[in-house]
Image (spheres, rainbow, N blue to C red):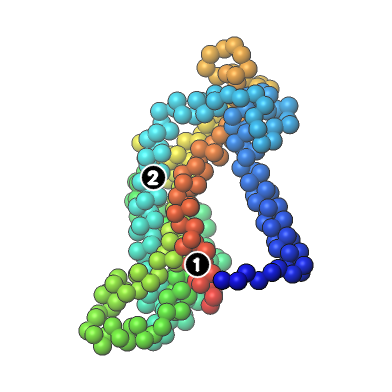
Amino acid sequence: MLMRKKSLEDIIFDTVIYVSLIFVMLITLYPFLNLLAISFNDAVDSIRGGVYIFPRKFTTYNYRVILTDHNIYMAAFISILRTVIGTFLGLLTTLLIAYPLSHKDLLFRKQISAFFVFTMYFSGGLIPSYFLIKSLNLINSFWVYIIPNLFSAFNVIVLRSYIETLPTSIYESAKIDGAGDYRILFKIILPLTLPALATIALFIGVWQWNSWFDTFLYTSQRQEISTLQYELQKVLQAASKQMSQNADFSMGQSGGASNTITPNSIRATMAIVATVPILIVYPFLQRYFITGLTLGGVKG
């Protein structure tokens, strides 16, 4: 196969593209690398500034402060559990709502879709939401992480738009062969919507993993169902409180600067600890993420 010789215009265009991509990659990676460097740098030394992408005074003490807290491991288990269950049930709910909405002959289809869009701009507010959760007996219950978050109007619209791009002849052929709605949904539509479902799974999973405010509001009285993000938040608050009393402080054994933490060092370490699980999962969903988001957003 003969290769076409690149013209000067092609070379300039490719060079601009590569330089632009490298620039975007650098400005995207830098904040993460900076946090990583600060998390592995001595806390007092970091206050001096000048730590960019490499630790100047290497230490693992910031991680030891967080990872030696026994509550962290139980909280991490609860966070994983709520992420897995919340993502699975959230996907199922989204699929069961989006599929009928994709049918143009559904009664009150436009009105239901308009109501969903309305909820994206206006909510009941924090206090009514709290009393609703209380009336449902979900206070201090694990299910407060799952049930109120089963539905997202944005996710339903993305998936509905994706399903609408599928040929209607698929439904007609399946119905001629005697398939019912549930069989069409789970045997035909479900496999064809995997890119969109993977995208929505990433949305729900990241939100469930990072959420801590619902733990603070509804389950802060039950340590056994506290989440990782909330426990990390408590560590940060404790460090900030101590920092406000002293310019810096020491935890654990007294002595060298390596036994000192600051809110800035704890914040960077928390960000790395909380981000690593998402970074592990993301490469497996990335190829679906781009396809699903692009195709799902065609009709808005």
Residue with the mark numbered 1: 291
Q: Amino acid at mark 2?
A: Ile
Q: Residue at x 46, y 79 (%)?
A: 165
Q: Is residue 41 left or right of residue 293?
A: right
Residue 38 versus residue 84: which sits nearer the camera?
38
Specify the quadrant that holds the N terminus: bottom right
Q: Nearer the viewer, residue 100 or 130?
A: 100
Location of mark 2 (residue): 80
Using the image, determine if residue 33 lies above or below residue 205.
Answer: above
**Amino acid tagged 1:** Thr
Q: Sort mark 1 into few (<14), some (14-19) or many (20+) by Cα contacts within 10 Å.
A: some
Q: Is residue 289 visible?
A: yes
Q: Residue at x 52, y 43 (%)?
A: 275
Is 246 left or right of 176, judged from the image as shown?
right
Q: Is residue 134 visible?
A: no
Q: Nearer the viewer, residue 8 or 111?
A: 8
